[in-house]
Image: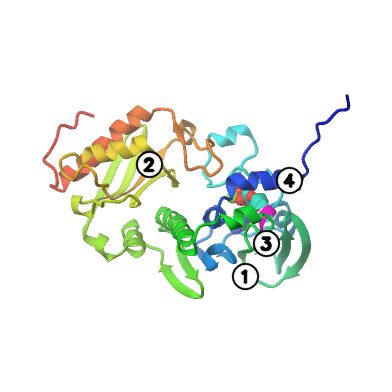
Amino acid sequence: MPDIIQLLSDHIANQIAAGEVIQRPASAVKELLENAIDAGATEIQLIIKDSGKELIQVIDNGKGMSPTDARMSFERHATSKIRSIDDLFKIRTMGFRGEALASIAAVTQVELKTRQAGSEVGSRILIEGTEVKLQEACAMNVGTNISVKNLFFNVPARRHFLKSPSTEFRHILDEFTRVALAYPGIGFRLINNGTEQFHLTIGSLKQRVVGLLGNTYEKKLVPVEENTELLNIQGFIGKPDAATRTRGMQFFFINNRFIRNAYLHHAVVKAYEGLIEKESFPFYVLFLEVDPARVDVNVHPTKQEVKFEDDQMMYAYLNAAVKHALARYNIAPSLDFSL
Ligand code: ADP
Ligand code: MG
């Protein structure tokens, strides 16, 4: 019998990976914003057209890339963020898998312009479905300007199954909100179909919450701050009247990475017992700082799921921190804090 196994071409491998990493326009938005943050940007602009189907553009004033790195950045498993497996256990960057740009390039048309502080000129690259069409010098500010056009142009099934423009834009807004909440020390702008929807200047977390979620939050926030050996917790919870019937206003960040975690959510909700109705969801924006060695962020390509070494302890600390904050602001009677 003849041998039948073949290695897939890079292009096909990238397209398959893209299926996991880039599910919709919002996934590309997340990856590009995170790259800008990892590049040390202090100002990030997100430009969207046709809910990301036509254009997703991110302009940052970060450290930029050399012309060679600019080309390399689109290779699969190409990253400047880790070198060894040990680095994974001390990860401080948002990215590390080296998959995002390769995946994006596999299913879109990309124009990347980038310039490092030390260079006179920048480099411009055009890529379509992983194929480099052009690379040339260009004039630009220091930083990176990446445009992702015609998402899924070569995967009609995916393009076809995108939801309505308003739903896809909603997902983009969710990603933008999460990233902007996590980095009040970075200025963000969001321009949607030519209209500026957000202009968030550098400020405090409180200013960022209000700037993103609305003035009504100004008087509804209760600060949370708790430092323990295992983790530091800080951020805001909402007063009971900020609770809502639908979810969506619950934000957990582990080492500045937005995550979903039903177990930790429960720890917060439990602290509100008797203060809010059973079916409603309290508002919270909580930042948990843990030793990166104690949390595995490499559970899923989108990194929204994480595994903790000591999740029961985390539950207990978090629950106590929220009760504490509620009590301190005289929202709940002082309870027994036996931790
Ligand atoms: P990862 O972020 O996991 O390393 P990506 O595919 O997202 O993988 O990016 C590949 C590499 O390209 C990054 O490691 C980084 O060195 C470089 N890069 C990507 N975006 C930017 C940017 N906006 N500014 C500077 N460098 C960038
Ligand atoms: Mg990345």
Please name the amino acid that badge 4 sits on: Ile
Q: Nearer the viewer, residue 134 or 138?
A: 134
**Residue 78 seen in the figure:** no
What element does badge 1 sit on?
Answer: loop
Is the residue under label 4 in contact with that under label 1 (CB below 8 Å)? no
Spatial separation of the CA atoms under disc 4 and disc 2: 38 Å
Spatial separation of the CA atoms under disc 1 and disc 3: 19 Å
Name the residue tied to disc 1.
141
Spatial separation of the CA atoms under disc 1 and disc 4: 35 Å
Residue 52 in picture, x, y percent from top left: 55, 63
Name the residue tied to disc 2.
288
Q: Residue at x 70, y 65 (%)?
A: 119
Q: Nearer the viewer, mark 1 or mark 2?
A: 2
On residue 110, the disc is 3
Spatial separation of the CA atoms under disc 2 and disc 3: 35 Å
Residue 129 in picture, x, y percent from top left: 72, 56
What element does badge 3 sit on?
Answer: strand
Name the residue tied to disc 4.
12
Magenta highlight range: 106-110
Spatial separation of the CA atoms under disc 4 and disc 3: 17 Å
Mark 2 lies within 8 Å of ligand 2 (Cβ measured): no
Spatial separation of the CA atoms under disc 1 and disc 2: 35 Å
- Rendering quarter of residue 225: top left
Residue 295 falls inside the magenta stretch: no
First in sequence: mark 1 vs mark 2: 1
**Label 1: few (<14), some (14–19) or many (≥20) C-alpha neighbours in 10 Å:** some
First in sequence: mark 1 vs mark 4: 4
Q: Nearer the viewer, mark 4 or mark 3?
A: 4
Residue at the top extreme, as displayed: 1
First in sequence: mark 4 vs mark 2: 4
Depicted 40 relative to depicted 267: above or below: below
